[in-house]
């Protein structure tokens, strides 16, 4: 059983793949990687990810991405089960980009804490008990920005993820994201959501790593003519959901 990680510091590269590229690339990749344990519990060896992003009325974080700021951040609430009857844990995440480095910090919230904050004020999260000090700092930063910038839920993004870890390079994680949809909603568990298809042309490969990359990955990238892209699920979802022009 893997240990939950609440602070991640790494590089991330993204590559858009056609369906044909995805199938061929994945077949070769499997000799170098193992499935993430969370994939193995499902028959299709994948799991769903749901993230509700918050932004200001002026879409501050969206425009920081659009303007290409080298140092920026965004807040999201992430859950892996959309059934409120199961009362799943919810993760508050801050994802920062500093030059070429990605830093992700997360705090684990119980279902009751999240619902009370959603129905009232973000200040309610500060009342949560038994939160480790490093995670409490994440909550405090979110609450501070929420009050300062009047952050509100903007868009929910859902997608199917296949995840792998390199067999002999444990600092390398590779994911394939597909069926990416966005919903203009203020409630992560709302059953009344109209989806927008955000990426319909294939699959997004994400490479997440620390240190150097093995030769086999360089070989596969060259063999399948993969090209790095600055694709952002949040950016494209905001464009689709709010008809933003950039």
Image (cartoon, rainbow, N blue to C red):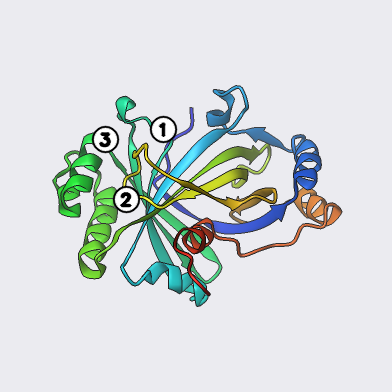
Mark closest to the chain's N terminus, 3 or 1: 1
Q: Position of residue 98 (x, y in %)?
A: 48, 69
The residue mark sitting in front, 2 or 3, is: 2
Q: Secondary structure at mark 2?
A: loop
Residue neighbourhood size for the residue with mark 2, other residues' Cα within 10 Å, grouped as few (<14), some (14–19), many (≥20): some
Residue neighbourhood size for the residue with mark 1, other residues' Cα within 10 Å, grouped as few (<14), some (14–19), many (≥20): some
Mark closest to the chain's N terminus, 2 or 1: 1
188 left or right, relative to 145: right
Can you tell which quarter of the image residue 228 is in?
bottom right
Position above or below: 31 against 241: above
Q: Nearer the viewer, residue 207 or 49?
A: 49
Q: Which residue carries the number 2 mark?
A: 186
114 left or right, relative to 229: left
Q: Secondary structure at mark 1?
A: loop
Q: Which residue carries the number 1 mark?
A: 81
**Residue 111, disc:** 3
| Pointer 2 with pointer 3, Cβ within 8 A | no
């Amino acid at each position: 059983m893997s240990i939950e990680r609440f602070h991640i510091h790494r590089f991330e590269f993204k590559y858009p793949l056609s369906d044909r590229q995805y199938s061929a690339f994945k077949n070769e990749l499997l000799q170098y990687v193992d499935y993430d344990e969370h994939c193995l519990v499902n028959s299709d060896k994948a799991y769903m990810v749901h993230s509700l992003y918050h932004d200001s009325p002026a879409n501050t974080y969206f425009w920081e991405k659009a303007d290409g700021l080298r140092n920026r951040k965004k807040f999201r609430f992430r859950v892996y089960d959309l059934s409120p009857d199961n009362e799943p844990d919810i993760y508050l995440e801050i994802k920062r980009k500093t030059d070429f480095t990605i830093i992700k910090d997360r705090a684990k919230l119980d279902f009751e804490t999240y619902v009370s904050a959603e129905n009232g004020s973000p200040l309610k999260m500060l009342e949560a008990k038994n939160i480790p000090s490093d995670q409490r700092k994440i909550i405090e930063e979110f609450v501070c920005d929420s009050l300062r910038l009047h952050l509100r839920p903007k868009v929910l993004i859902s997608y199917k993820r296949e995840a792998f870890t390199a067999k002999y390079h444990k600092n390398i994680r590779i994911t394939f994201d597909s069926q990416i949809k966005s919903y203009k909603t203020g409630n992560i568990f709302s059953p009344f959501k109209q989806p927008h298809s955000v990426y319909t042309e294939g699959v997004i490969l994400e490479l997440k790593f620390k240190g150097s990359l093995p030769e086999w990955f360089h070989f596969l990238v060259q063999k399948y003519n993969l090209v790095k892209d600055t694709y952002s699920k949040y950016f494209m979802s905001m464009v689709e959901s709010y008809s933003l022009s950039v």
